[in-house]
Image (tube, rainbow, N blue to C red):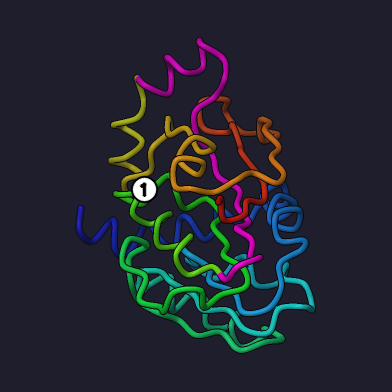
């Protein structure tokens, strides 16, 4: 699985995550992002074309060296500096309160310890900063949930640890964030067990 996970899977994900319907989700998610940005799960840089002009810099965290190579051209065309950091989401090496915005898109499903990663995201946000996210996860429909639970281990094996059944809103709230805006829906054209999205903006809770 080493070669598949390290060499093949990042290229598959780059292609799969380039669909127009996902690009539309990225655009909606990133509206309002500004200042110095931490993007956790940067992957191959698919978010870069959708960042608003208010962004001054992006610090990109991702452990995949292949994804980093796939991102080079997108980074070169970015209108702002991009600093790539080869780390897992649970090991964000940044000072407290050092970012205006934190971004996570289609990432919390795969991070082995999402609670630890979210704790770091909250830690590095400045007062008044915002967390922008879109993630797939646990659906509200009982029938879909049963399929998510049945297929979760298979999905993890095929897609590098990606879980189908994580409750995204609950994970974010449990990390101490307060939701400012949240939208939940099924992604058009995706199987329902893999296509339930939670998109929103959260702030540091009191």
Q: Position of residue 53 (x, y in %)?
A: 79, 78
Q: Which residues are magenta?
A: 126-149
- The residue that appears at 49% across and 75% down in the rendered structure is 60
> Would you place residue 118 above or below residue 36 in this image?
above
Q: Position of residue 167 (x, y in %)?
A: 47, 32
Residue sticking out furthest to the front: 206
Q: Position of residue 204 (x, y in %)?
A: 57, 56
Task: For mark 1, give the secondary structure.
Answer: helix
Q: Position of residue 170 (x, y in %)?
A: 49, 35
- The residue that appears at 33% across and 54% down in the rendered structure is 116
User: Which one is in front, 42 or 206?
Assistant: 206
> Would you place residue 31 above or below residue 69 in this image?
above
Question: Is residue 130 a member of the stretch shown in magenta?
Answer: yes
Q: Image quarter for residue 8?
A: bottom left
Mark 1, Cα crowd under 10 Å, few <14 / some 14-19 / many 20+, is some
User: Which one is in front, 150 or 36?
Assistant: 36
Q: How many marks?
A: 1
Residue sticking out furthest to the top: 143
> Would you place residue 22 above or below residue 155 in this image?
below
- The residue that appears at 42% across and 14% down in the rendered structure is 146
Name the residue beneath numbered marker 1: 115
Could you tell whether 138 is left or right of 78 in the image?
A: left
> Would you place residue 172 above or below residue 10 in this image?
above
- The residue that appears at 40% across and 79% down in the rendered structure is 85
Question: Is residue 166 a member of the stretch shown in magenta?
Answer: no
């Amino acid at each position: 699985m080493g070669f598949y996970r390290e060499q093949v899977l990042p290229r598959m994900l780059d292609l799969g995550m380039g669909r127009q319907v996902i690009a539309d989700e990225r655009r909606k998610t990133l509206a309002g992002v500004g200042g110095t940005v931490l993007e956790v799960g940067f992957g191959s840089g698919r978010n870069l074309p959708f960042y608003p002009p208010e962004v001054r810099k992006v610090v990109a965290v991702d452990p995949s060296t292949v994804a980093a190579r796939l991102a080079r051209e997108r980074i070169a065309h970015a209108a702002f500096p991009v600093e790539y950091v080869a780390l897992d989401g649970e090991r964000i090496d940044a000072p407290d309160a050092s970012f205006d915005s934190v971004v996570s898109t289609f990432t919390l499903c795969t991070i082995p310890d999402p609670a630890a990663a979210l704790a770091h995201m909250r830690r590095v946000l400045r007062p008044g900063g915002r967390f922008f996210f879109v993630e797939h996860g646990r659906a509200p429909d009982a029938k879909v949930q049963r399929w998510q639970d049945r297929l979760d281990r298979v999905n993890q094996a095929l897609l590098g640890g990606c879980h189908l059944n994580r409750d995204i809103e609950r994970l974010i709230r449990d990390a101490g964030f307060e939701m400012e805006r949240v939208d939940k829906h099924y992604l058009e054209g995706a199987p329902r067990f893999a296509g339930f999205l939670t998109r929103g903006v959260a702030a540091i809770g009191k």
